Image (cartoon, grey):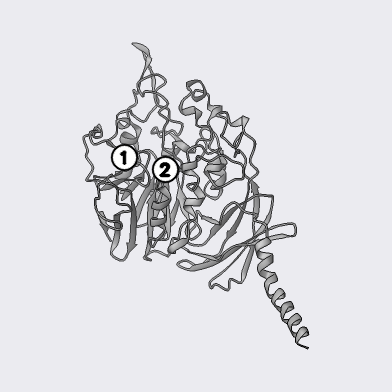
Amino acid sequence: MKKLLCIALLLVLVLLALPALAQQAAPVLTYTEPYLLTLNPQSEMSVLWLTKEPCEGFVEYGPTPALGNRIEAQRHQIKGLRTSATPEGYDPDPAKNPEAQVYQLIAKIEGLDSGATVYYRVTTKNGADTQVGKRYFFNTAPQAGGSFDFALLSDMQMKVKTKETMHFLGQQEKDFILFAGDLSNTPWKVGEWFNYEGAYQVPAEADRSFFECFQQDGDNSRLMQYMPVFFCPGNHEVDDQRVMTDKTMAADDANWSWSVYMQLFRPLYPEQEHGVNGKRWYSVNYGDLHITSLNVHRWQSWDGFDYPGWITKDDISPDSPQVQWLNQDLSSATQKYKWVVMHWHMLNRGDDAWFPVSKAVADPKNPEKAIYPEGDYCWDVLRPLYEQHQVNAVNFGHSHVYERYLINGVNYIEAASIGNNYRATNDPYHPSGHMPVMEENAFRSVMVVRVDENGMNARGIQASVEANGVGYIGRVFDTFSIAK
């Protein structure tokens, strides 16, 4: 009898252990956790994730952790990502590196209530294999008058301590992020986005891939799984970065493509126009805030005064489609506050600010030299539009520094000091003569913004203590407010 009881007890223990054993043995079908994008944050949200095979998937969602609703995901193949030619490294020519097999699932949840908390969970299936994800949540945008928080970010690029700064940012309460470009270094290298078996990673950067940094959720850090991110492209979003060093390649428009970036963040760019003159700008309304995302950046492959000069492929001349759209977008916006996100710094203390943002031409007196007869479109075209349409703030990146300017009511913010920074103490001020009202590059930092019944209140927050021992983590070192 005792023997039978022991056998029965053993069977019960085995049966109880089977689900855990099955879960341990279940194959991993995905490269990433889910991430969130939307052009209509008050009523809809796209849930995206990347898979290893052409999987099927669906999202369960609802107003409580019990979920209750389900929507099927659409599948796309991400084209242009490549693994390394050898485990020791990538060949500089993208075509000499094998194609990486990466698929994207997108489920668009529509008909949501404004100002609501939505719980969700993704499930991925490949034949008989099923992978059930963790449960997350996000907040939809409130109606006019509602409160919300957001953060500024840019220039991750696998830089030193980026992961730590991102983790700190994830612990700040917020509802979305504005990202001002330069997500990775070379978009076609799959290992810069996530861990891909066999793909080379620089040893010191092995834990700094984009999604690994942007999807941390330990110690109450909430990032891409919990909130939408509104991106704009930077100079490092061009697929083949050899256009930054090879004049012959740079001169041919066929070598310019933004395909990997635009595919990964597909819901923000429904037209999917990957080439030169493609549409890479959009706007969204989030409660009382109108957000405009632009495509403004350039490439300094050589000295700015050596022909062909610094290259712009995102026209912001007065009659360009992007500027015409911007004028209409800002003039028709009825939200209380207006905010623009773009990559190229409107103002900056660096040397590169002295090269105008416009089309360079050969100097008639010396064809090897470049001149910019049309001046600086950022200063002469964009700035007047921002002032005319009463834009409250413009945030940008590129130099990995913290600088804030205030000119004719517009705050210009480079909140890009999350890894290294490129500022020297003797760098010249902007050609306009304007100096920053706040400049702080002794430590890494983030900016968070609160919009509520009191108006808009922004805070620059210290995110590290470096060798010089300045300040402390969490210290507010810069503020600005816009009254209701």
Q: Position of residue 55 (x, y in %)?
A: 69, 53
Q: What residue type is disc 2 on?
A: Lys
Instruction: Report helix, strand or loop for mark 2.
Output: loop
Q: Is residue 263 left or right of residue 162?
A: right
Residue depicted at x 47% and y 63%: 140
Provide the residue designation for mark 2. Answer: 159
The reply to whether residue 273 is in sight is no
Relative to 50, is 220 above or below?
A: below
Q: Which mark is residue 203?
A: none
Relative to 408, is 112 above or below?
A: below
Q: Position of residue 177 (x, y in %)?
A: 42, 54
Relative to 314, is 9 above or below?
A: below
Instruction: Report helix, strand or loop for mark 1.
Output: helix
Relative to 154, is 310 above or below?
A: above
Which residue is at the front of the view, 360 or 106?
Answer: 106
Provide the residue designation for mark 1. Answer: 383
Q: What residue type is disc 1 on?
A: Arg
Q: Are marks 1 and 2 in contact (CB under 8 Å)?
A: no
Q: Position of residue 427 (x, y in %)?
A: 25, 33
User: Splitting the image into 4 quarters, where does residue 189 fall?
Assistant: top right
Foreground mark, 1 or 2, reads: 2
User: Splitting the image into 4 quarters, where does residue 219 fall?
Assistant: bottom left
Q: Is residue 452 left or right of residue 124?
A: left
Which residue is at the front of the view, 88 or 263?
Answer: 88
Residue depicted at x 36% and y 50%: 339
Residue depicted at x 53% and y 55%: 35
User: What is the crowding at mark 2: few (fewer than 14 residues within 10 Å), some, or many (at least 20)?
Assistant: some
In the rendered structure, which disc, 1 or 2, sits on the residue that comes first in sequence?
2
Q: Position of residue 420 (x, y in %)?
A: 36, 42
